[in-house]
Image: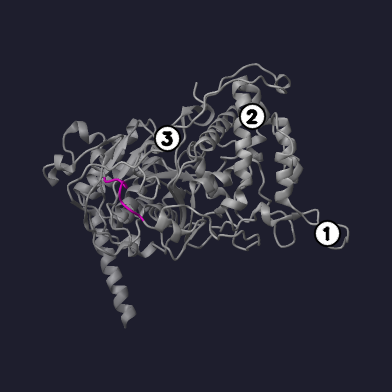
Amino acid sequence: EHPGSVQQTATSSQSRQKPQKQSLPSGTPPITDFYSPTSKKPTTTSEASFQHKQEKSHTHQSNTLDDSEFRSQSDYKDDSMMMNTDQENYKKGDEKKKFPLMIKNELRVDSRTNLSLFNTTEFRRTNRITPFPATLDRKKANDAVVMPYSVYINFDPKIKEALPIRLSDQITKALKENPIRDSYELQEAITFYNEDCLDSGFDGLHAYFQKISDAKFEQFFKQTLPKIIDLALQLPNLITKPIPLLRKGRSGSISMSQEQAACILANGFLCTFPGRTNSYGKSRDFGYPAFNFNSLFDIKSERVLNKLKCIIHYFERVTNEMPVGIITFERRKIDAVENILERSESKFCEFYAKSEGVIEDAIGMSQIDFANKRIGGGVLRSGCVQEEIRFVLSPELLVSLLITQVLGNDECLIIRGSERFSNYTGYSNSFQWTGDYIDRTPRDKQGRIYSEVVAIDALVFQSFSQQLQQPMLTREFAKAYCGFYLPESYKGDRYAIATGNWGCGAFGGDKLLKGLIQMMAAAEAGRPLCYYTFGDKELVDNLVKLNHFLRKKEITVGAMMQGLLKYAQQSKEHSSDELLKFILRSHSDLDFLVLVEYQKVKHNFMRAIQSL
């Protein structure tokens, strides 16, 4: 049995006050070493049209990957093979094996807006991670997380006898003074230093430890928990200044080591972070998600049980062998896109669709997180859909909840370098942790994993007609494009995007329309799209048919936008089937092309008027 597996027994919590000693397997699979892909034939990417990428693409060494295999593009003799014409391949679209990936393509963060929790100069010179600054800075900062070592409790300046007590000292006392032998003693320790947890019953946490085997119970409280506590108490040594916040309306990024991220998560697990308060001392979230894990511990359900399996397995792994790498959390904001969208001359890119598979298995691609505008959604509560599952598979993503304010309509969050630790099956109520996952994604020279999770939040819709309103179409396009585009400073291959039914399901989005909007955003970014329909074979056929037709007719993004607006005005009954028929019929009649020419004439006329 692997250290992360769980067995269910009927053993009660009372019988576990003095668990029997038992030898347990230990150790962690080694950190994946960087391996070099095979050399590739140079390819040329297309020219992009948005202001964020107003330069021609360059010829680069293309690196492609399908699952665990690399394939040389020299296998493809000419450009005519880029579009499949045989019926079998047409069903899925282009060949995913040809899509460029991010492997060996360096995407550097902007040093002017990136804040690091380690000494970057020392890291570049010696490849060693040392905290920055060198000495601890306990002062609070307006644009930073309130740290446990920055807070005093039980201190009243009006009472002479009152002595200031540092919160971090209370935490140390509660966690280290006596061994913690079960979940009830863990609850008692947490509520000793965090009064916000007094109303929490910790029912979910108690249920977890009542269901696991005696061996796993003993392993946690005798081995794993003491290591989690030691890791959490290293906070003043590993993170020597308050962690900067990613504020709404501001582009910027924060880089940290995987060890620093693990330390933050250990403190979240032990609920050590003070609550966010305003200048009057009243509790307020300011648009930031809750980060302490007591909200998860409080819920008793199978969903929470399996989430806890993922999280505790993560701690078992990192406390046995700490991964060495860098993670970057980037908040991105784009300029208005309304006028540019209508005039865009970008053409649709390669497209691959599949009814089987999941986004997180698309190694080397940008993996789209169907996010809540409050990052993480219900991951630390009962939520258990795409975003929540992705975050517990790679718990380092949870750090974003601590530092990311609610996303605006023109913003997204991009997380690079996170590692996956768990396997799973199911979705929502059927979600189950199934064991350990060894992340074999290559690492760059700095140890950063070539992974990129892009969080974009969709709007909630009540009807198809509402989705076709121009402000709604523009907003959803802008949100997707914000996550899809690559900055001007990036000179590598325009690697593929892995996505799916973004904003559908509970959010009410239409699958075909959302797929089309993402095709438009990918076209504007000049990147191929790999689309997972989660079992919907009919959607695969419709999306591939649509993409094939738009590329064959060389329809532009601007023309497609005008066509959608025309459909909204002319059609009385809005549906996926009717939209698809309208697009195919209208393009064959050249209606959209006439609209585009009209928009060009209108634009030139308005510019002439303005010049006068």
Q: Which mark is residue 30?
A: 3
CA gap between label 1 and label 3 equals 51 Å
Give, as a single range, the part of the protein colored magenta. Answer: 100-107
Residue 49 coordinates in the image, percent (x, y): 28, 61
Report the residue at 61% width, 56% height from top: 145
Mark 1 crowd level (few <14, some 14–19, many ≥20, 10 Å Cα): few
**Residue type beneath disc 1:** Asp
Does residue 364 appear anywhere in the picture? yes
Confirm or deny contact between disc 1 and disc 3 (CB under 8 A): no
Residue 608 vertical placement versus 597 (above, below): below
Residue 56 coordinates in the image, percent (x, y): 23, 62
Whether the magenta-drawn stretch holds residue 280 is answered as no
Q: Which residue is the site of mark 1?
A: 156
**Quadrant of the rendered image containing residue 584:** top left
Mark 2 crowd level (few <14, some 14–19, many ≥20, 10 Å Cα): some
Does residue 381 appear anywhere in the picture? no
Q: Is residue 34 rendered to the left or right of residue 426?
A: left
Mark 1 or 2, which is nearer the eye? 2
Q: Which residue is the site of mark 2?
A: 222
Residue 578 coordinates in the image, percent (x, y): 34, 41
The mark nearer the N terminus, 3 or 2, is 3
Residue that protrudes farthest toward the left in the picture: 77
Report the residue at 62% width, 41% height from top: 230
The mark nearer the N terminus, 1 or 2, is 1
